[in-house]
Amino acid sequence: MLTAIGFASVYISRRSHISTASLTYALLFFVLYLAAHVVARFTVPNADPYLLPLAGLLTAIGLTEIYRLGPSNAFKQGLWVVIGVAVFALVIVVLRRDYRLLENYKYLFGLGAIGLLFMPLLPGIGQTVNGSRLWIHAGGFQFQPGELGKLALIVFLAAYLREKREVLAQGRVKDWGPLLVIWGSAMLVLFATGDLGSALLYYGIFLAILYVATARLKFVAAFIGLFLVGSAAVYEGTPHVRERVTNWLHPWTTQKVYCALNGHYTLRQDCASYQMVQSLYSIAHGGYGGTGLGSGVFSNAQGAPLIPYLSTDFIYSAVAQELGLVGAAALLLIYMVFVLRGFRVSLAANDGFSKLLAAGLTFGFALQTFVIVGGILRVIPLTGITLPFVSYGGSSVISNFIVVAGLMLVSDRANA
Amino acid sequence: MNNQLNRLALVAVIMLAALIVATTYWQSWAAGSLAAKQDNAIELVSQFEVSRGLILAANGNTVLAADRKVKRNGQTFYFRHYPSKGLAAQTIGYSTSALSQTGLELSLNDYLTGATSNLSNAIQRTLNQIGGGTVYGDNVVLTINPGAQALAQHLLGDRCGAVVAMNPRTGAIYVMASSPTYDSNLIDKPGGYAKVLKTKGACGDSSALLNRATYGLYAPGSTFKMVTASAALDTGAFTPTSGFNDPGYCVEYGKHVSNASNPDQTAETYGHVTLAQGFQHSINSVFCNVGKQIGAKVILDYAKRFGFYSTPPLETPANQRLPSGLYKNNKLWFPKDPATEVDPGRLAFGQERLQVTPLQMLMVGATIANGGVVPRPYIVDRVIGHDGSVVTRTRASNLGRAIKPETASELNQMMVSVVQGGTGTAAQIPGIQVAGKTGTAETGVNKVYTAWFVSFAPANNPQVAVAVVLEKQLNGFGGAVSAPIAKAIMQKLLHR
């Protein structure tokens, strides 16, 4: 574990070639992880030893890239990491005796999830960013409550499905009720807020937990069928979705098409798919070895940024350009190791709730990575969500630290 | 539940592995084609982080294109400027931040950015990059003679047309001028590009960006008689002394095809003449009869040997050069059955649907000067690394033999007689024998012609070949308006 932390800190110290002042960042970061480690060591001594260092490594990569893209953002992100680690410690300390008591409050979690998802729709505090209404804004402070809603939903699904898995597997209709209501309204809210990436993510998590709990592939197949029908309806009904699919299939046009952004006719790569296409150029520019940290091209000759949302949703294309195929593949391998450790925790857990909880958290983590990176790489249509631990964004950092805390709690109990 | 968990884990791993595969695809497989996309803003910017090599004229001193260092937001950019303010503008092209590249700036981009260097340079480049140092491109030395190039542009003035000159022995291009022209420095200035697009020559065309020397298509008029005469002599069907009777016209398909007009609007009439005299005075009826006798197929086959029907090789981008030949509906056209589809008489004296570039007609003249072997034109003499070492040097080569040495020699003499006492006397240079051929092609507008002159000198030991074309010349005959320009260029290049 210490070697991994060491590697993380060595990695961060590489930033010193950009500015020596950043060494303090590295030091602060190291101390922070040491603290987190000490807390974990005393409260959950039997927890999986790899999860926290891996999370630290990812955070370090993200912080480094964010620092390179804009030092002021890195400071804020640093603060969020501090808060994230504090929340991590808090969760572990509070739930160290038995996190399974969460099971008793499952409906509370279910309702809480919907409440959190609804929050941005409330007038006054809700805020629309980039066509999606998923921020709340209060006193110079922005937050995406959906990130926490996701976790609450996983807790609810894990608890409910643990209790009802046998009866559900036999297909008793009335037991589907609460599940469908809570989950269905969550989906509704998501479509209402226009946050398609998260909708896709939640649907995937739901299917995964359902499958693990019931072992019925036909349920999964049925829900995928429902999803396709729903997608078709959404595709027809919302221009937002249609545009995303068109951009995915045909990012480059040779003829001018209508551009909704400025009302003129332009090539699609100069309008709707501009961000995606430039991001692909950024990745391609990296090649095998990358341009090196600090040497990537992210702004034009006049200094204006080329790719919007580079440090949040599109951070992967920044990393891929500067670190190249080697670095990008290494980053994805870190995610893979984290995910495999997560599933190992789930496999080792002794009770159904723990298994489902760990599996839900882990699969959600993997799926989130897939949805955003796959979107950037044109594997699937692009929907903007954050890359866990790496993207700039406070809510995302905090919720991911809670994921780590949850997985460590489960593994501590399993190994005790 | 563990079975399901294992399967779910597999799904997750496959998803993440797919991302690695996709990343590999974009960063290796697709990287090249993405980098070549016109709208790639990242490549556009990153190329300005490279100190581009110089483009120099043949003397190695005259700088045609250079870099200006600009520091902006802590980053160093190198922007292009053109110290000779548009000397050979269309040939050099431009490389700007606002627009993509053209001309040699485009086709030599890999050299100018140091991307095609050998392994040790590649390593050096990578080391520079990692160390944050500047990547330097290679310098390019052209075969362009700056004095003659400037003179050609000056003599063209605002008249639309082109002047191309080369060494007929090697194919090295000395002059490649196209008019109207522009100052390449304007392209990157606000509103400059629009201004260049509006630049009009005396012909009224606003196409300053066009390299007329390699992309302008013109009716060759009588300059094509060099090709017809080559075919007539080379096949053995005629000799220079073959006799003709010229009544002032030639009968084709039962109709009269008249010679060029005298000033009083009557057709010139020469009576009994030889083929050589027909060439000297550019008598259409003579060539009309030659064409009828040897047929369109033979003439077109000889045209092919001179390089017609293929894009002439040169270092400029391929889409800035056009092949010469018969054109039908704006497309290059080789008739399936020339005997029935092409009028051999009109083809023989350069009418029909022939469209040629000045470079192609220069190649015809240079081939005759070079004893019948077509020189391969080139404009890049050598590429020099940032450290001064020669990266590559162009070796003169040829495109094969078009006509026998004897035929070339006979044509050489016929072309000398054109300048000595025929249609091209305006190209005479004291003390040197000049060989030439005039061309005055009808444009469809009465008394407005495309005026040609193709020449080389000294005739007994050719050092330089020139082709001049002027568009839309009112009463302008090739021998009167184009020959003096060719003469001045040859004098400049021969230091006479």
Image (cartoon, coloured by chain):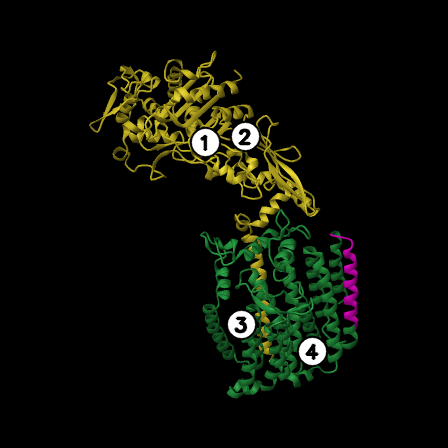
Chain colours: A green, B yellow
Q: Which mark is residue B87?
A: 2
Specify the subunit that label 3 lies on: A
Amino acid at pointer 1:
Gly
For the residues labelled 1 and 3, the Cα–Cα distance comes to 61 Å
Q: Residues within 10 Å of mark 3 (few under 14, many from 20)?
A: some
Residue B172 in sight: no
Front position among marks 4 and 2? 2
- Residue labelled with disc 1: B201
**Left or right for B275, reference A138:** left
Q: Earlier in the sequence, mark 4 or mark 3?
A: 3
Name the residue at the top extreme: B431
For the residues labelled 2 and 1, the Cα–Cα distance comes to 17 Å
- Are labels 1 and 4 assigned to the same chain? no
Q: Which residues are magenta?
A: A18-38
Circle 1/circle 4 CB separation < 8 Å:
no
Amino acid at pointer 4:
Val
Q: Quadrant of residue B229?
A: top left
Which residue: 53% across, 60% down? A378
Front position among marks 1 and 3? 1
Does residue B10 belong to the magenta stretch? no
Q: Earlier in the sequence, mark 2 or mark 1?
A: 2
Q: Residue B459 placed where, x, y %?
A: 44, 17
Circle 3/circle 2 CB separation < 8 Å:
no
Kind of element beneath mark 4 = helix
